[in-house]
Structure formats: C-alpha cells, structure tokens
Amino acid sequence: MLAKYQAPASPIDEKIVRLHQLAWQPARFAHPSWLMKMGLRSEKYHYGDCQTLDNILNLQLIDWRGFPKQPLPAVLTNKQKAQMALEPRLDTVCMALGLVSLRCSDYLRIRHYRQALYPILNDEDVCQLLGIGCPGERAAILSPEILPSIALQLGRGILHATSSAAVTWQALSILLPPLPRAIWLPSADLWLARLERLL
C-alpha cells in the first residue's frame, strides 16, 4: 500500500499576519493618542486584561478609521511586503516625507539641522534624501529645535492622506497618532515609493 503524499505546510508569511493583526486588533497596537481620544489613559489600559473591553475598543477603532471595510488580502505583493517591512522605521519615513514637504534642502545640508534630526534620521538617511533629489528651493525658517517635531507631524499627516489607497499603509497608520486632518502633498505617492526603496 502506498502512503499518501502530503505536501509540506507552507509557513504563513509574518508580514501578512502582522497586517491582519494591525487591522483587526487595532487597540492592541494603537498609538497611545488613539486610546486618549477614546477617553482611556494608555498607561492604565493593557490589551488582554479584559477581552470585552478589547473587543469594544477594536470595533470602535475599526469604525472610526473606516478600516478595514473589505476583506484583507491573503497574500501580499512584493511591494506590500516592502511597505510592511518599514514598520520599525515608520517615524523615519514620516520625517522624510515631512522634510520633502518643507522643500528646503538646507535642513539636510547644514550641520546643526542634521544633528537635530538625529536619531530618527541618521547621516545615511539624510544622504539618501539628498541623493533622490529632495526639493530645496525654500529658505530655512524653522529653528533646529522645532524642525524634528514639525517635520514628523507633517509627514504623519501626509502618510495619513496617502494611506487611504494602500491597505498596508492603512494598517500601519494605527501606529501613528490620530490627526485632525490629513495633509495633501503633490506627488506624495511618488515620494513615498522612492522612500520605500531607500529607507
């Protein structure tokens, strides 16, 4: 008697698992500002302590964000995998987008500005931004002390605006604080695609 051949089980891609976790369990991963918006103190709430509360918060966040509204993919494209791989550097991507929107290359060239961007952007990141042609026709008007927070906030707003089209960015946006409104940047998708490849 011949034994039946059983194909080896293929492991589930960790990035697709992470996408589904961020989408369906947003309270578990939400930036503390989301919880504050819901009237909770993030230091008092611990996901997993009360399943009923967790479920209520998950449903509320899904409703507020309008995501997900449709079934999520079972397999990610290579581009989506690359986007999910940027999760640990999400603030780097946001700050880079913010700097692009400020259109001032002096923020990347002048030493005291570069130092202010560290540790979110390191020297290699700054060189890559300059290398891909970060626009720079405007004068530097921000002080080095406020530049990082302004660039980060602008970048987060831009990412919120561009995230509506990409399921991966929609999922990752729960890790960012909620913003009162998204910020539109002409050619944001083009810059985001460039940053995905470099950062």
Image (cartoon, grey):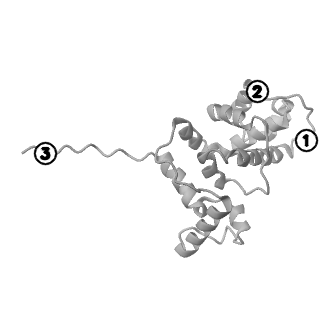
State the residue position of label 2.
Answer: 130
The local secondary structure at tag 1 comes to loop
Characterize the local packing of mark 3: few (<14), some (14-19) or many (20 or more) Cα atoms within 10 angstroms. Answer: few
Question: In the image, residue 188 lies at what x, y percent?
Answer: 74, 37
Residue 104 lies left or right of residue 66; in this view the side is right
Quarter of the image containing the N terminus?
top left
For marks 1 and 3, give the CA distance.
72 Å
Viewport quadrant of the C terminus: top right
- Asked if residue 33 can be seen in this view, the reply is yes
Q: Is residue 178 above or below residue 144?
A: below
Sequence-wise, the earlier of marks 2 and 1 is 2
Question: Which residue does the image show at 79% across and 36% down from the upper left?
Answer: 186
Secondary structure of the residue carrying tag 3 is loop
Name the residue beneath numbered marker 1. Answer: 142
- Circle number at residue 127: none
Residue 144 picture location, percent across and down? 87, 41
Tell me whether the residue at label 2 lies in contact with that at label 1, contact meaning CB atoms closer than 8 angstroms: no
Q: Residue at x 83, y 46 (%)?
A: 150
Dot 2 alpha-carbon crowd within 10 angstroms: few under 14, some 14 to 19, many 20 or more: some
Q: Amino acid at mark 2?
A: Leu
Q: Observer-nearest residue: 9 or 139?
A: 9
Name which quarter of the figure residue 175 lies in: bottom right
From the viewer's perspective, is the residue at label 1 or at label 3 nearer?
3
Seen as rendered, the residue at the extreme front is 70
Tell me residue 4's x, y (percent).
Answer: 16, 45
| Circle 3 residue | 3
Q: Depth-wise, is mark 3 or mark 2 nearer the camera?
A: 3
